[in-house]
Image (tube, grey):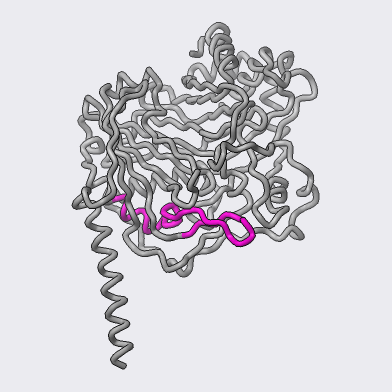
Amino acid sequence: PTYLALSRSLYIYIYISSVVVKALVFVYPKLTSNMVSTGSGGGEVTDRRMSTVVPAEVAGENRMQEVTNMDLAMRLHYLRVVYYFPAGGAAAGLTVPELKYALFLLLEVYYPACGRIRLSESGRAVIKCNDSGVRVVEARCGLTVDQLLPAGHHRDLAADNVLGPDVHFSPLVIVQFTRFKCGGLAMGFSWSHLLGDAVSAANFVRMYAQILNGNPPPKPHHHQSPQAVPEDPATKPPGATVHPLSVKQAKTLQDRWLPTNELKMGSFSFRVTGTQLKDLQSKASANGRTPFQVISALVWQRLAKFPGHGGEPTVVTVCKSNASAARGWVVSNQQAVGTVRAESPPSQAPLSELARLIAEGFVDESRGIEALVGSGTDGGPHLVVYGANLTFVDLEEIEAYELEVKGENPVFVNYSMDGVGDEGAVLVFQGEKAAWGDGGGRTVNVILPEDQVLHLREELERDWGIA
């Protein structure tokens, strides 16, 4: 009895001590492992201070979170999301300790985001939920929000995040808080796609905002959380074993989970107002098509007029994020990935026909991708999804501007992607509604080979007045 009592007391002491130390991270930031760097990029971002935030509650000893085959298919891709809040508002007035403490509580629910990658005996990746935490970057920007947004230096507001070379120590999520010269605030989230899709990342940020607003979620029951189980190949529908056209095997950069590019890639973003969208739909005889379908058709046609190293892109990949679908777990990759094929040269096809193909000609290859990854015990080959073909990513359903922090909505939200293959990717998401007053438009982020970036910009500005 004495031995049992001492063991129980020791366990309680260790548990309480761990919670107290974690709480002190927010009260005394110097107790965390901080690194400070100075220097600026194109966006004049300086004085980066890095630390780690852990969850408010221990997830459990030796807890492993299995990942699905689709998770593994996305392991070389990384999502960047930045939310901008103007000076003078309650959101921008939040202090770093307040921002960190809300993250501390959030990670109690999203504890897999605090884990680290491990390889099982078979070589398949899993997430060890060891409470290692997420990386936090505090930075300053020498520009105002109004100065930075037209310049488009969004990349400086979300930290680089690539798994490896020491993948066992690489964080799955990095959060960056950047204070502007004017007092405005940017919240940047760098999200490993292995952890979940864009909808999962948006839900992560939405719950974070709820906590900042004083509405913390109920405490999770860790022992009841579902584990992702690889599918039995026998349950897959006919055609799932056909090699999908929407992915390619990738070469990675040494021990980093990032595909190598043979071409020098560039990026740019442009905005299409609600008025411009209606005009585009009318001129293209594409009424009834969604903005994503019309914009994708336009970009597809224009890039086909300037074919890259592989000729005209007659097969393109489409990724659909279903924000309204029920989700059984807080993080998951549930987007549909498939291809659209044009039987005739896209450069000669009318926009209405290309928009119709994107709307009606989508062939879902998600099961085929899962089967390819699951064909071996080690998680299959490293694949490129975004950029294996010219890839159009539909993020329209994500209500980015409905996010509310302290009664305020962001003035701008930007999505981008790292790990894009040589064929490029086009992300289409909601535009800022308040700025235009016409029901909102769309923001488009393009990652392409540099020569195609220049060509596309010239084509859009000359023929459609879109820049």
Viewer-side residue, 329 vs 124: 124
Classify residue 252 as left or right of residue 100: right
What residue lies at 43% left-to-right and 68% top-to-bottom? 61
Name the outermost residue toward the top: 462
In the image, residue 315 sits, relative to residue 232, either above or below, namely: above
Classify residue 21 as left or right of residue 388: left
In the image, residue 212 sits, relative to residue 344, either above or below, namely: below
Viewer-side residue, 105 vs 66: 66
| Residue 461, x across and y down, in percent | 52, 9
Q: Is residue 127 magenta?
A: yes
Classify residue 179 as left or right of residue 463: left
| Residue 46, x across and y down, in percent | 28, 28
Residue 288 showing in the rendered view: no
Magenta part of the protein: which range? 102-128
Q: Is residue 311 magenta?
A: no
Name the outermost residue toward the front: 254
In the image, residue 182 sits, relative to residue 120, either above or below, namely: above
Place residue 298 in its image quadrant.
top right
| Residue 108, x across and y down, in percent | 37, 58
* Quarter containing the N terminus: bottom left
Viewer-side residue, 228 vs 161: 161
What residue lies at 32% left-to-right and 55% top-to-bottom? 105
Report the number of numbered marks. Answer: 0
| Residue 107, x across and y down, in percent | 37, 54
What residue lies at 39% left-to-right and 34% top-to-bottom? 158
Classify residue 428 as left or right of residue 124: left
Residue 34 showing in the rendered view: yes
